Amino acid sequence: YFLRITPSVMENDLTHVYHLNAASFGDVSAYYYYAYTPLQFFVGILMDRYGPRRLLTAACFLCALGAYLFGASHFVWLAEIGRFLIGFGSAFAFVGALKLATIWLPPERFGMISGGATALGMLGAMIGQVALARRVEAFHWQMTLYFSAALGILLTLAIWFVVRDGQKVHGKKNYADTTDYNVLFKNLWASIKNPQIWIIGLIGLCLYLSLSMFAELWAIPYLSQAHHITIEQAAPISSMIFLGWAIGGPLAGLLSDYIKRRRLPIIVGSFCAAILSMVIIYSPHMPLPLLYVLLVVFGIFNSVQVLVFALSREVSSQKISGAAIALTNMFVMMGGMIFQPVIGHILNATWTGKYTANHLQLFTNHNFQIALSVLPIALIIAFFASMFLKE
């Protein structure tokens, strides 16, 4: 997640060095999702077949290599390859952590590890936005990427020398491949034919846009423009959305389990998130302390998105629950792939032709408000779609 959000704090540098406009900036950032999204369905199968040690080592190295390539050249196609490699490697991180938990830890610890890994992802994004912004300000954006790549190499070595796939049982590893590919694709087709999965996937995609489209990329440029602050000052404000998700995700799960309902929290969360998104986007002159609070609360309400995975499992038969969850996750991650560049194209279409003193495109609050209207529209769609959910 630390690497995923790097473009948001480097927008001015990237657009200047690679000669990008808003649309092409969104396109470059989205290369992460071009790799990450389709891989989600296959990562679990590969983990079962080859074990986490080799895959996580290779994946972490690809992230480090991608970070280096992203800043090592003045050719935009090389930056795109770098983002693609970061997305490719990142696709293995969360599933790899959970696979290690299933191998080494007792089953009753799985929920704690899953929640902890999710919280660490949000923490990586929060620290990333603040620390990266300061490091870019102090050491230049390319040196920051080289530093990130160096950390990635150290982590690659740590994974290889520390992580183990498990003890051998009767001469075989305990992750022995039992994958039947015919059954796998039959299960996937059964999930595709279930209309509830499409509704759940749509809701998950819309709610996750608060992160994949807004917090990860366009929030910092918007806040910087709307509130006349620097990128370094906007980064910690934007990171409050991640804090809200880190707080709200576990709470949404606990509340949903307690009341034994999935549909109601999603209805309430999507409605409140839609209202807050309009306040945040269409009130650019609010006091900054109030904005901090609103963004945390906004993240909390959006975090009901975590319930879509429980829903996808519960509306499917047990034999296809894995395929249903994987399909839902692919829907969710498609949001960043589609809408990161879409916002850039809308900004380009509404741009007045003015430039800053540094020869960068100058966007007005109105330009951002038109482009970012995608977010409240998506949350309203999630609200109405949740009316058709089945418990």
Image (spheres, rainbow, N blue to C red):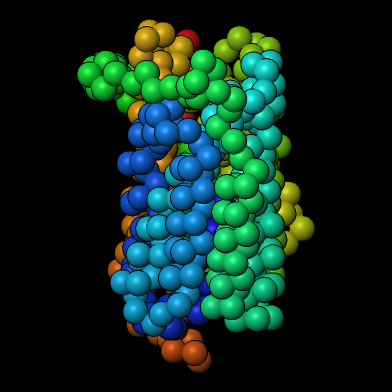
Residue farthest to the bottom, as pictured: 357
105 in relation to 391, above or below: below
- Residue 309, percent across and down? 48, 24
Front one among 185 and 373: 185
Image height check: is 314 above or below 226? above
Question: As rendered, which of 155 and 313 lies closer to the eye?
Answer: 155
Residue at the image position 41 percent from the left and 80 percent from the top:
73
Left or right: 117 in relation to 321:
right
Which of 306 and 60 lies nearest the eye of the viewer? 60
Report if residue 236 is visible in the image: yes
Q: Would residue 277 appear left or right of 135 to someone viewing this image?
A: left
Horizontal and vertical percent position of residue 66: 45, 63
Instruction: Indicate the position of residue 234 as horizontal and vertical percent values.
Output: 65, 66
**Horizontal side of residue 190 vs 12, given as left or right:** left
- Vertical arrangement, residue 354 with respect to residue 155, above or below: below
Q: Residue placed farthest to the front in the image?
A: 171
Residue 349 appears left or right of 359 = left
The residue under the point 55% across, 71% down is 145
Q: Quadrant of residue 255?
A: top right
Tally the numbered discs: 0
Query: Residue lying furthest right in this view?
Result: 289
Expressed as whole percent of the image width and height from the top left, the position of residue 31 reads 36, 58
The answer to whether residue 216 of the structure is visible from this angle is: no
Q: Residue at x 51, y 48 (%)?
A: 57
Residue that appears at 58% across and 59% down: 152
